[in-house]
Image: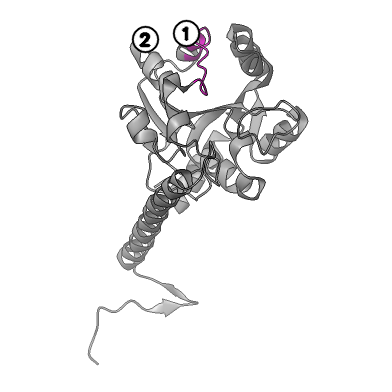
Amino acid sequence: MMKTNCPTEVSGKTNNPEFNGEVLNGVWKMRNQLSQQLNEMSRTVGRLQCENSNKETSNKGGWCKDTSYEDSGSHLTDKALIPTLSSFLRGKKVASFGDGPGAYKREILKLGQVKSYDAYDGAPFCEETSEGRVKFMDLTIPQYGIPLYDWILSLEVAEHIPKRYESVYLDNIFRHARAGIILSWATRNQGGTGHINEQSPQYVLDIMEKNGFYRDEKSSKQLRKSSTLWWLAKNTNVYRRISYKQFEENNTIFKWYL
């Protein structure tokens, strides 16, 4: 009987590990490419929405061009908080999901304590208005093909995300945070430009705990105490991953972050 190199099927699975690996790598590559294509399409649509209206934000919550600049008056940076943030993140790979004009990235990198810092934002003109510090990333789209970080920083971003995309935004920050997330989410009736999804502190705590994070009370208080902007002094919390081992095992199996 003539032998072939075709993998045999056993209960719908192949017994050829090399073949399995090639198939999975192909699927992951296609997934990443689709994510990138959707991201680029979203930026194009967001720009058109901004250019064809007099609104300050796009339909998905990203700031339009005039309000994206650091000196536009729409962005305030808590410079008193930065040394405490930098010290907390010392030696870590950090990403900011929703960094606006990239002021936090610039100021934290000046202190030279973090291992690396990448900044992303959903404002369709952010790469221009941030002088290249910030990369465009629509957090309402499942994001793949970007690195895994130790810590994700997302300050006063969630309230700008339409409720129907909230779970996608959260999944993006959950999947890319190895150790934890520093999160500030505007509370109900706080008010602010583009605030369309304010939530109570208990709502935020519950959703973080359900997804495998616990609030580090000591670190949260340290950051809030260092803040001079009242909304950050009220809303900022540090959430650490409960099971680092389980997260690593899941990433090995599914390559969620690739």
Instruction: Tell which circle, 2 or 1, labels the residue nearer the N-terminal end.
Output: 1
Instruction: Residue at 69%, 27% (x, y): give it.
Output: 191
**Quadrant where the N terminus is found in the figure:** bottom left
> Where's residue 89, x and y in %?
46, 18
Helix, strand or loop under label 1 = helix
Residue type at the position of mark 1? Pro
> Where's residue 107, x and y in %?
39, 14
- Horizontally, residue 164 falls left or right of residue 90, namely right
Q: Is residue 55 visible?
A: yes
The chief SS type of the magenta part is loop
Residue range corresponding to the magenta coloring: 73-85
Disc 2 residue crowd, few under 14, some 14–19, many 20+, Cα 10 Å:
few
The dot on residue 83 is: 1
Considering only vertical position in the picture, is 91 above or below 213? above
- Horizontally, residue 158 falls left or right of residue 200, namely left
**Please, which residue is most extreme toward the bottom here?**
1
The CA span between labels 2 and 1 is 8 Å
Considering only vertical position in the picture, is 18 above or below 142? below
Q: Is residue 92 visible?
A: no
**Residue tagged by mark 2?**
111
Instruction: Residue at 34%, 12% (x, y): give it.
Output: 110
- Horizontally, residue 26 falls left or right of residue 74, namely left
Asked if the residue under mark 1 is in contact with the one under mark 2, i.e. CB atoms within 8 Å, the reply is: yes
> Where's residue 242, x and y in %?
62, 32
